[in-house]
Structure formats: structure tokens, C-alpha cells
Image: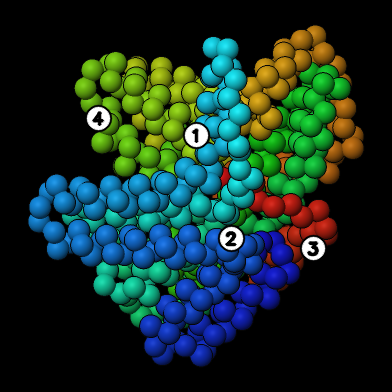
Amino acid sequence: MLFNSIDFAIFLPIVFILYWFVMNKRLKLQNLLIVAASYLFYGWWDYRFLSLIFFSTIVDYSVGLKLAKEKNEIKRKILLWTSILVNLGFLGFFKYYNFFLDNFITAFSFFGTEIKPNSLNIILPVGISFYTFQTLSYTIDVYRRKFEPTKDFIAFGAFVSFFPQLVAGPIERAKNLLPQFYSKRKFNYAKAVDGMRQILWGLFKKIVIADTCAEFANMIFNNSAEYSGSTLVLGALFFTFQIYCDFSGYSDIAIGTARLLGFDIIRNFAFPYFSRDIAEFWRRWHISLSTWFRDYLYIPLGGSHGSTLMKVRNIFIIFIVSGFWHGANWTFIFWGTLNAIYFLPLMLLNKNRINTDIIAQGKYLPSIKELLNMFITFCLTVLAWIFFRAENLAHAFQYLDVIFSQSLFSIPRFLVMSRIPIIFTIFFILIEWVGRENQYALERLGLKWKRYYRWAMYLFITLLIVIFSDNQQEFIYFQF
């Protein structure tokens, strides 16, 4: 079920009414409703994959309880690895089986040996990378004795399958989300209004910006051999804003929907395109995944401690694994490697944490230095996104080859035709800049205006969403 669909527009009010007006007196019933609604939400795509979520829930719930009772460290490690192998086993089979098989065949062909194993027509379950990491973090935290396992199976099932963030995050931690299922929730009008405001902004980002940019990004990337370097730059810029508005738009809708139900889930984006270096970008982009890899992979490997060689190794591991998490394609691995190369000089010079504040905080405009740093970081990010979007590595390098040719200085095609998404993207950037000190751009915008001005703004945004809603596309991160 898509957030930007009529189905969800009917589904959410029904859940909201049942949740607050029918089952509001019993916490168990509210949690059970969340489980039922989440399974319906996910089963809307393909009910067959509900068994994966249910099986993963049973495994990690059982492992968590046994870890709490078990004192023998060897047995505890066996339990932990049972959870890891089950979860990553499902993820590996559905997401990476054909990738490894194809590369296995290619490797043998290189040495002159022809093998013809059967590949499988595997359907990737929506959101498997997200809920797999969410349940894994629970088991690992229980193993590390940082979190007490729950005995409430319904609450745990609601935590694993919580529909607002089930299929594209944010990837929640048990210590933040699971305790919220234990305590009685009271309807908070201000919280619900804030949730609706964030949903509105998320829909604007997805439908008005991401989907309109996608039309031209797809056209240019899919026919890149026909266009000039300047047109390919335009295509890369369209994709840059498409992926950000698509994914952060989903996160805004997820966070807003959770707030309607009385939950607070973690922030996933913090205006990453206003970053002054790549390290800052990665602290602001897909925060839930970046912090997951930091806590469960980077720090256990040694983090920034140890020899310089170990530090370099850890940086490459974290970025390459992050790239591979996104999909079974060498383009994602190269994208991760490229970001590691970007990040490395900052780490080696110990400058990876110099930009931890908000850019131009309390000011209208950045300094010239901040503007230049932001522009360089943005350009590096756009370059990396070309590999992320390309069909394969050959396509990416051909794309770049045309960009860095004389045709870069020609007038791009589609410049006039794409004026509407360009105008609205500029409008969007301005709103994001004004609201960059908040949790999301629309959080405080207009709150001090007279009510009819504020509502006029909301109605204008709503009207734009309705006008552009004919060009609906799936969220990009559903494929991950």
C-alpha cells in the first residue's frame, strides 16, 4: 500500500478512528490493532511475504527470551548467530542469490570453464532490508545486555511490523520504539496536528518534487547516449532531488503517521544537501542506517581507533557494505567505495567532525566559505548519484564521459520543457533553507502568521499535491 495512494487515504482514517475511539481504553487492543493494520498494509503488496515477517518475529522474540536466561557465553553466541543467520539468510537469498550466482558464472567463464546453473525468478519482498535490520538490532542489543527482552509478544510483533516505517524506514531501535508499546497512549491534539503537517510536507516532496523530477531523470538516464553533456548534468540534478525528496518524503510521512498514533520515531534526514563536507552529509543522510552501521559494524571493527591502516580498512568496509545493502549491483558497491574515498581525507586529517552545527545558524545567509564548501560537497554527491542511478558501471562511465566533453557547454535539452519541476525545486530548496533549524522544513513555518494566511499556505500545498498526483510513482527505496 503506497502512502501516496487512495487506498492509504482510506486506510489511515479507519485505523485512526478504531485506534483512538474504539480501542483507546485497552493498550493490548491498540497494539493488536497495530499488528493487524500493519499486516494488512504489508500484505496489500503480496500476502505471501507476511510469513517472512511473522517467522522473523517468532525467531527474534524467542532468541531474546533465551538470551536473557542463558548464562553460558558460548550458548549465548550460538543464539545470537542463530538470529543473525536466519535474518541475513532470508535477506541474502531474496536479495543477493542471483547476483552471486551471476558473478560466480562470470568468474568461472574468465578461466575458460562454462557452467550453466539455473537462476531463479526471485521476487524481492518489499522492505526486507529495513525490517531485517530492525529485528537484528533488537537481538544484538539483548545479547550485549543493553536492552531487556520483552515478554509481550503482541508488543514485539507491533514493533517489528509497525506499518508507518515498515517498508522504507526509518530503521528503529528497540530501545526507542518498543517501550512506547508498553505505556498507555493518550491523544495529543498538538502532536497530531504536527504529524499532519509533516505528512503534508512529505507528500509535497514525493508527489510535487520527486515524481516530476523522476519523469525527466528517467528520460535522460534511459536514453543518455542521445544527449549532450549539459543535458546529462541536468538529468543527474533531477535524480539528485528525486532520490532525496522521494526517500525523505517517505520518512516524513512515516514519522507524521506515527505521531498521529502517539509514537515518536527517529529522524532520518536533516537537510543533507546543505552539508559542508561529506562527513556532515553522512550524518544527515539516511541517519537510521548510518547510525546502525556505526553501532553494529564500524565500532565493533575498532572504529576510529587503532592504526591508520585499520581506520582506512574500517571506513572502506562501512561504506562498501552500505552500498551493497542498497542492492545487488556493482554500481551500488562503486557508489559506496566512491563515498569512502570522499570521506577518507577528512578522517586522516581529523576534520570529519568540524561541521557538527547547523549551517549559518541564526542567520539568513551562509558565509562565502560555507557556500563554497556546500557547493563542492553537493557536486561530489551529484557525481556519486550517477553511479547509484546507472544501469551498470559501463553505463555510469559512459554517462560521465559525455559530461566531461565539449558538449557540456551546450544548451541542455528539456530546459524549457522541464521548467515546472525546476521552478518548484527552487521553491522547495528555499523552504528547506528557511526551515533548516527545525526537524522538518514546514515544522514552524507560518505558525506566527494569522490563521487564514497559514491555512492558505496549507491549502496551496494541498492543491499542488492534487494537481501533480496523476504522475504517481513507487518510492525508490521500496526496491532496497
Q: Which mark is residue 466?
A: 3
Q: Judge left or right: residue 68 versus residue 283.
A: left
Q: Image quadrant for the N terminus?
A: bottom right
Q: Amino acid at mark 4?
A: Gly
Residue 84, horizontal then vertical, whole percent = 33, 48
Between marks 1 and 4, how big is the CA–CA gap? 21 Å
Q: Quadrant of residue 450?
A: bottom right
- Label 4 sits on residue: 302
Between marks 3 and 1, how big is the CA–CA gap? 36 Å
Q: Judge left or right: residue 204 versus residue 116.
A: right
SS assignment at label 3 = helix
Can residue 380 be spotted in the picture? no
Camera-nearest residue between 334 and 269: 334
Camera-nearest residue between 177 and 201: 177
N-terminal of the pair, mark 3 or mark 1, is 1
- Label 1 sits on residue: 324
For disc 4, the neighbor class at 10 Å (few under 14, some 14 to 19, many from 20) is some
N-terminal of the pair, mark 3 or mark 2, is 2
Residue 82, horizontal then vertical, whole percent = 30, 51
Identity of the residue drawn at 60% across and 37% down = 118
Identity of the residue drawn at 28% across and 47% down = 81
Are the residues at dot 3 and dot 2 in contact (C-beta closer than 8 Å)? Answer: no
Between marks 2 and 4, how big is the CA–CA gap? 36 Å
Q: Amino acid at mark 2?
A: Ile
Q: Which mark is residue 253?
A: 2
N-terminal of the pair, mark 3 or mark 4, is 4
SS assignment at label 4 = loop
Residue 233, horizontal then vertical, whole percent = 74, 24
